[in-house]
Amino acid sequence: MTRKHTPATRAATPVTGATAGSRAAGTAQAGTTAPGTAGTRPPGRRDPRRPAATPPRTRQTHPHSRQRPSPAPPQPRPTDLFADRLLAVLSGRRPVHSMLRHTLGSAYDDLSHLAERGPLRTPRGAGPTVRDIGYYVPRPGAIEAFARIGTGDRLRAMAFRLELGTDHRWRCTAVELDGPRRPRDQDD
């Protein structure tokens, strides 16, 4: 004689709080509890009515693909940096000695002579700003640059030369501003 096993069918009506207790006591499968009722289930078994916990989604990459790092922000050109530094000294916002390690030769003397006169100082209002920068590379490791400086409604010109040292740092070797030049000594 063969026995036929028929699976238990669930009730078509939703389980409410009033019927949950009776279902949990009478018709529920062993080891499970109805929602809203107290009970325990054997360790290691999960409630079949609740979805299994899924791990958080992570981005999958192809094992042979390379992730490209985000590009670094563009570094300012040495001409831009020096134009701002020279402008800060010539407008009186920074002292001349702040350029000691950034200049070579007679450039520091020229800069201090120009700064004494304060050619780009404005009595009130907005200070001077760099409007435009251009440059020429006569040889590798040397840059001759010019900057247009806006001072109020007037436009001024500043020229400077940068040279790359053996320590891979740019230094200013000459600086000029529009107007009369500093008289040179015989030993310059």
Image (tube, rainbow, N blue to C red):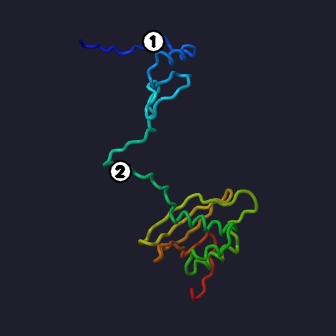
Quarter residue 180 falls in: bottom right
Residue 132 drawn above or below residue 56:
below
Query: Which of the numbered marks, if any, corresponds to residue 11?
Result: 1
**Residue closest to the eye, 102 or 11:** 11
Q: Quadrant of the N terminus?
A: top left
Q: Amino acid at mark 1?
A: Ala
Query: Which of the numbered marks, if any, corresponds to residue 183?
Result: none
Q: Are marks 2 and 1 in contact (CB under 8 Å)?
A: no
Gap between marks 2 and 1 measured at Cα? 54 Å
Q: Residue furthest front?
A: 1
Residue 130 is left or right of residue 124, and the answer is: left
Task: Give the image location of residue 126, x and y in percent.
Answer: 70, 57
User: Considering the numbered disc 2 on the image, is that residue within a helix, a strand or a loop?
Assistant: loop
Q: Quadrant of the C terminus?
A: bottom right
Number of marks in the image?
2
Badge 2 crowding class, 10 Å Cα cut-off, few under 14, some 14 to 19, many 20 or more, is few
Q: Residue furthest left?
A: 1
Q: Which residue is mark 2?
A: 66
- Residue drawn at (50%, 16%) of the image: 23
- Residue drawn at (58%, 88%) of the image: 186
Task: Give the image location of residue 101, x and y in percent.
Answer: 58, 76
- Residue drawn at (50%, 69%) of the image: 144
Badge 1 crowding class, 10 Å Cα cut-off, few under 14, some 14 to 19, many 20 or more, is few
Q: Residue furthest bottom?
A: 187
- Residue drawn at (46%, 15%) of the image: 27
